[in-house]
Amino acid sequence: MCGYVAESVEGGSVAHEDLLAQIDACLDHEAENIGEQSSPGSRTQSNDAEERAGQVKIYTSGSFLDEREIPPKTRAAIAARFADRDRIVVESLPDFVAEGKIADFTEQGIETDIAVGLETATDRIRHDCVNKYFDFAEFERAAADAEAAGAGVKAYLLLKPPFLSESEAIDDMQRSVRRCSGVDGCHTVSMNPTNVQKYTMVEELYYNDGYRPPWLWSVAEVLDSTADRDVIVVSDPVGHGSDRGPHNCGECDDRVQRAIKDFNLRQDPSVFEQVSCDCELTWETVVERERSFSMPLVQ
Ligand SMILES: [Zn+2]
């Protein structure tokens, strides 16, 4: 389901200088947009600290803590660049999470979160439907290491990977949120509904009538039913309302998306009482009757 495989560096890595050039380009962009004069070396001594971003997220679309992607000296240099910010978020597969690496940030006094693409708490679904190799136990180990370093963990979960029916996807997500809420150090879950990206197996299934992205009603159902758990759950459906993204009937998509955004801010499930549409009956029927792809019609 992930299209980044088509956008990776061909058989190599990105040099220390080039990685820092990317960071500095972002810092220059920020400086320009808050009206500062940008000049090399001056940006960390800015007098306008309150106008700059307090929180920095570095999404490598890989593993920031994998030292083949980001060498230790690059990691240390990036930590120094952002030492005067409040909070930093970096993403990593759990295997690469280690207390010593995170300490580069926490020792600078930066609140640190590690975003982990857990996808699901169910090992079989992660292995066979998502094609990721690690086990839930490895995620628990990573969360413990992050906590020991004084950092937190955000779990990224994938709603409706291929080969699951709508109801199986909802069940899997509800179970996953519950299990994540029981992991020390995991304070937030970000639920990402699958969308159809180019050159992926999901796209192939989609063109063969073997895949439909999840209903926005399913997103709402999971948020509503897990709101009592001791973990923040957020969702920002990408491509909502389009055929290749999470969608309902076309009439109500924007309204349901707004309710989801509202829930992200308030964590109050009553926002979903204020949206309804005739297509809820279709969704309920799908949840009740849909079976797996390629089930024979008669034996
Ligand atoms: Zn509708």
Image: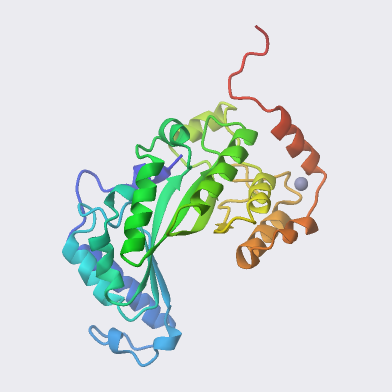
Please state, as top left, top right, bottom left or bottom right, where the C terminus lies in the image. Answer: top right
Residue 138 lies, in percent from the top left, at 35, 45
| Furthest residue in direction right, as rendered | 278
Q: Is residue 61 left or right of residue 170?
A: left
Camera-side residue of 85 and 152: 152
Q: Is residue 227 above or below residue 20?
A: above
Can residue 82 be seen here? The reply is yes
Residue 100 lies, in percent from the top left, at 23, 62
Residue at x-position 61% and y-position 46%: 246
Residue 121 lies, in percent from the top left, at 47, 42
Q: Is residue 170 left or right of residue 198?
A: right
Can residue 21 be seen here? The reply is no
Q: Is residue 243 left or right of residue 118?
A: right
| Furthest residue in direction top, as rendered | 299
Residue 58 lies, in percent from the top left, at 36, 64
Residue at x-position 35% and y-position 40%: 134
Camera-side residue of 254 and 275: 275
| Colour style of the rendered protein structure | rainbow
State how many labels appear: 0
Residue at x-position 68% and y-position 60%: 258
Residue at x-position 37% and y-position 76%: 29
Camera-side residue of 110 and 17: 110
